Image (spheres, rainbow, N blue to C red):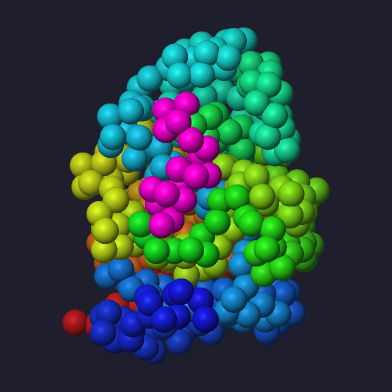
Amino acid sequence: MRNVDDHWRADPAELGLDPLKIQKLLDRARREVDAGLLPSVQIAVARHGRLAVFETFGEAGSESLFVVFSATKAIVAAAAWLLIQDGLLHESERVSEIVPEFGANGKEAVTVEQLLTHTAGFPAAPFHPLEWTDVGQRMKRLASWRTDWEPGSRFMYHPTSSMWVVAEVIERRALMSFQQFVRERIVEPLNLPDLYLGLPHAQFPRVQASVHVGEEATEADFRALGLPLPVPNEVTEEAISSFNNAEILAIGVPGGGGVMGAAELALFHQGLLHGGLGEKIWQEATLSRARAVRTGGLTDPTTGQEANRALGIVVAGAQHANLRGFGNTGSPRTFGHNGAGGQLAWVDPDTGISLGYCTNGHDRHVLRRGRRGTAISSLAAVCLQDG
């Protein structure tokens, strides 16, 4: 049995959650599986550091693991928070002072904060995951990147590039691999052995292969909603499919290569809310500092709304939370980071509820996918018992 089954489970009512509301959430979560659109879905809800819900629908089973793509960013960011807490790093530091090889081609003034807030200025900088294993090649690659704008002056989502640099910063300051640092300082203290950043080959058969499903949204679909057309980036079908490769998953791509289940996502975010799950990992001052929005009035070009980025995570905000990947019923303080293909991961400090949702079915219709995420998150956020 998985660790989550025998260690973390609790009766939903004991955690103050309404079984009828949970059932409504589960019915919604399985809808696309029952309709034949998504091959598998896994969902988990946690509160008070315990797991209230953990269900799997479709071809996957409870032992299955999923690539959570950019939900990984919150985990790697939380590792950087620990270095800040330890006094080994400051978000205002210039990256070039930590990784001198990086400081070329207009990147000399880029700060750690700008890496974590997607304001560093090189959103499309190329890097192949297998280059990470060759230190000389990866330094050559980081040095070659050029900025597209003055660092800090604009927001544009960096799907993977900036997190490769964050991983390098962690290694320089922690004096160990970023994968080992995450394992020793986060995974083991949280007691979540099925949270992987750098998947062992023996675990690869448990991973549900990502597949693309459905039809793409049309330009007319976007215009009807008053939304900007999608900004092309590196998250292509080919890129997503590359994560079906055991060698790629073994790297632990810091911007999107985490492997786990929905339970690990929900419980990890409980750890971010409470500072740990039993053992204290993050101090409250560290968490408050990390959750503070750093992007001011900078606009996300994919939504036309404020980016609302903190140190490696997204904060829901009082308006347009659904356009940032959250539901419509959570508090403005809700934070987390979703992943490509519809992975959901967040926690609401006002209610204590956290959600993890994984699917290996990558719906090409991004608007339908967004509506699904909004619906599931909205139902999860209001699972508290009335009164």
Q: From the image, which quarter does the C terminus lie in?
A: bottom left
In the rendered image, the vertical position of residue 200 relative to residue 42, given as above or below: above
Q: Position of residue 100 (x, y in %)?
A: 52, 13
Residue depicted at x 27% and y 70%? 48
In-image side of 347 versus 345 (left or right): left
The answer to whether residue 159 is seen in the rendering is yes
Q: Main secondary structure of the magenta part?
A: helix
**Residue extent of the magenta highlight:** 172-188
Is residue 149 one of those drawn in magenta? Answer: no
Q: Position of residue 85 (x, y in %)?
A: 28, 36
Residue depicted at x 68% and y 63%? 202
The answer to whether residue 339 is seen in the rendering is no
In the rendered image, the vertical position of residue 203 relative to residue 282, given as above or below: below
- Between 297 and 27, the one lying in front of the other is 27
In-image side of 220 versus 180 (left or right): right
Give the farthest residue toward the bottom. Answer: 20
- Count of all numbered marks drawn on residues in the image: 0
Q: Position of residue 58 (x, y in %)?
A: 67, 81
Q: Position of residue 338 (x, y in %)?
A: 52, 54
